[in-house]
Image (spheres, helix red, strand yellow):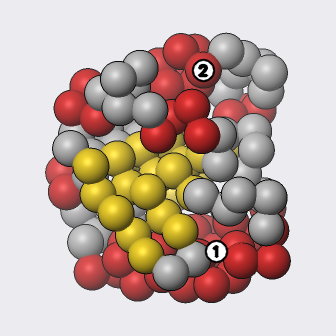
Amino acid sequence: MSLRFLADHCVSNYIIQTLRNAGHEVHRLKDQVAPDSADPVVIATATRLDAILVSLNGDFSDIVTYPPEQYNGILALQVHNHPETIPRLMSLVSGYLASHPDMSHYKGKLLLAEPHRLRIRM
């Protein structure tokens, strides 16, 4: 079973291709709405697509503004201006996704992915 993602405008082709190579369905934000859409439009688009939002935008890791229980899942990639860490980060994320291949697992969760750990907030 594959997972369905919406890649925010800040998500690189490398990340998108890594997810696709693992057999996941990835929609690009720019194919759905204007790439410079406000964050509420972005998360609403992910909800409409029944997709997990994947973003490097730190705003989506704010559980007060974006309570995880209201969404299909948010994957917040914490790169912190160090793009050289992305391959290591994606290796960690890919392993987790392979271990949890069902969309229902991500509903109501915020996954904060850093190169050395993956934290889950609910």
The residue carrying mark 2 is 39
Q: Can you say which quadrant of the picture contains the N terminus?
A: bottom left
Residue 21: image quadrant is bottom right
In primary-sequence order, the first of circles 2 and 1 is 1
Residue at the spot x=71%, y=77% of the render? 85
Q: Secondary structure at mark 2?
A: helix
Q: The disc labelled 2 sits on which kind of residue?
A: Asp
Residue 71: image quadrant is top left
Visible in this render: residue 105? yes
Q: Can you say which quadrant of the picture contains the C terminus?
A: top left
Residue 9: image quadrant is top right
Q: The disc labelled 1 sits on which kind of residue?
A: Thr
Q: Position of residue 76 (x, y in %)?
A: 51, 50
| Left-right relation of 21 to 68 | right
| Left-right relation of 18 to 100 | right
| Residue 18: image tag | 1
